[in-house]
């Protein structure tokens, strides 16, 4: 019984006729060629996971605000400003009916993991009147 052995070999420049002959003499045959090049792109999508509070718009494939997640970010920010522990914040956010992106209950760790995102979006979450209004609502609770 025979099996096919494959080898992928990076090419640091161009291949010469000698390179092909050496591999051929070893029993290898050329079965594919892969090309790549760098191109300019205007694609502004971020690599990896979509940041919490944003979503990919189906029509444009660009990031747009996710209203539900933005609300969670706002609630987390308010609770952090009130200087609650991560455990208390997780408990409160769960009581308010919010869940993580995966649909799970919030935990002290998941709240802690949101801190970099809150630092990033904090200055944009509340502006002027909206911040005053939310502080009044928070005080009424």
Image (tube, rainbow, N blue to C red):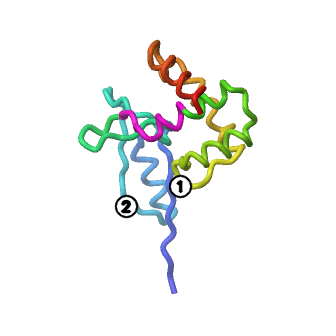
Q: Residue at x 31, y 27 (%)?
A: 42
Q: Nearer the viewer, mark 2 or mark 1?
A: 1
Residue at the far bottom: name it: 1
Q: Residue at x 36, y 51 (%)?
A: 33
Of the pair 108 and 92, the residue shown nearer to us: 92
Image coordinates for residue 10, horizontal then vertical, percent = 50, 45
Residue at the far front: name it: 140
- Which residue bears the numbered disc 1? 103
Q: Residue at x 60, y 28 (%)?
A: 78
Of the pair 58 and 26, the residue shown nearer to us: 58
Mark 1 nearby-residue class (10 Å; few <14, some 14–19, many ≥20): few
Q: Taking 88 as reference, is 82 above or below it?
A: above
Image coordinates for residue 119, horizontal then vertical, percent = 60, 24
Q: Identify the disc placed on residue 21.
A: none
For label 1, the SS is loop
Compared across the picture, whether 108 is left or right of 135 comes to: right
Q: Taking 100 as reference, is 42 above or below it?
A: above
- Which residue bears the numbered disc 2? 31
Q: Earlier in the sequence, mark 2 or mark 1?
A: 2
Q: Residue at x 56, y 22 (%)?
A: 135
Of the pair 9 and 37, the residue shown nearer to us: 37
Image coordinates for residue 114, horizontal then vertical, percent = 62, 36
Image coordinates for residue 3, horizontal then vertical, percent = 50, 78
Stretch in magenta:
63-74
Of the pair 48 and 41, the residue shown nearer to us: 48
Compared across the picture, whether 111 is left or right of 6 comes to: right
């Amino acid at each position: 019984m025979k099996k096919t052995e494959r080898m992928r070999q990076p090419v640091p420049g161009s291949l010469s006729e000698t390179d092909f002959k050496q591999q051929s003499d070893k029993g290898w045959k050329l079965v594919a060629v892969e090309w790549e090049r760098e191109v300019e792109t205007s694609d502004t999508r971020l690599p990896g996971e979509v940041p919490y509070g944003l979503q990919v718009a189906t029509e444009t494939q660009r990031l747009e605000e996710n209203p539900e997640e933005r609300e969670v970010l706002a609630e987390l920010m308010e609770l952090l400003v009130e200087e609650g522990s991560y455990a208390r914040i997780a408990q409160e956010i769960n009581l308010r009916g919010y869940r993580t992106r995966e649909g799970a209950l919030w935990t002290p760790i998941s709240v802690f993991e949101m801190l970099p995102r809150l630092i990033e979006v904090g200055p944009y979450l509340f502006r002027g009147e909206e911040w005053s209004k939310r502080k009044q609502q928070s005080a009424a609770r």
